[in-house]
Amino acid sequence: MIRPATPADIPAIHTLIRELAEYERALEEAKATEEQLHEALFGPHPAAYAHVATDDATGAVIGYAIWFLNFSTWRGVHGIYLEDLYVRPTARGGGHGKALLTELARICVERGYQRLEWSVLNWNTPAIDFYRALGAHPQDEWTVYRLTDEALTKASGT
């Protein structure tokens, strides 16, 4: 079952975020707290949205998608940027990841958004194969850049 996340899901989502970070070999970079997630998803000015996948038998949260709106100046409309998509390894193969992406694609179509985009690590072959099987195409001509920590402070001029 796929449904919008609720505040009660925050502890489970936080745990899954840490599992994803460990899988992506970057656990030390996963610094978000449950309080930060609650504010980002359910505060007065949400910065992001979340859907969860639950186990059909137990109702336990076994996967999640966190996403936010982006905007295409070329298309003139919003799109969805998928920040995280994660399903516990023990629940993979049950269609939960596909169902989460299907729900986000449905939201795009329903709202007139024209893009659903995300990033994937180059070494994550299982995810790449999964996305390609759904018809997603890599944007190989683009390279992601990021400013964080000291570089971000330096770039800010402060």
Image: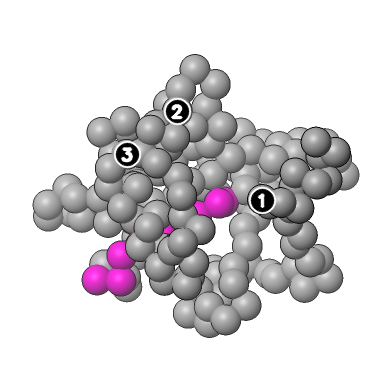
Q: Which mark is residue 126?
A: none
Q: CA distance from mark 3 to mark 1?
A: 26 Å
- Give residue 24's position: percent from left, percent from top: 48, 70
Residue appearing at x 26%, y 67% in the figure: 91
- Give residue 82's position: percent from left, percent from top: 57, 51
**What amino acid is at disc 2?**
Glu
| Vertical arrangement, residue 70 with respect to residue 56, above or below | above
| In the image: residue 134, left or right of residue 34 | right
Q: Which residue is mark 1?
A: 149
Is disc 2 surrounded by few (<14), some (14 to 19) or many (20+) residues within 10 Å?
some
Q: CA distance from mark 3 to mark 2?
A: 10 Å
Q: Is 83 covered by the magenta stretch? A: yes
Q: Earlier in the sequence, mark 2 or mark 1?
A: 2
Q: Which mark is residue 39?
A: 2
As rendered, which of 129 and 42 lies closer to the eye? 42
Q: Which residue is mark 3?
A: 10
Secondary structure at badge 1 equals: helix
Is disc 1 surrounded by few (<14), some (14 to 19) or many (20+) residues within 10 Å?
few
Secondary structure at badge 3 equals: helix
| Contact? badges 3 and 1 (CB < 8 Å) | no
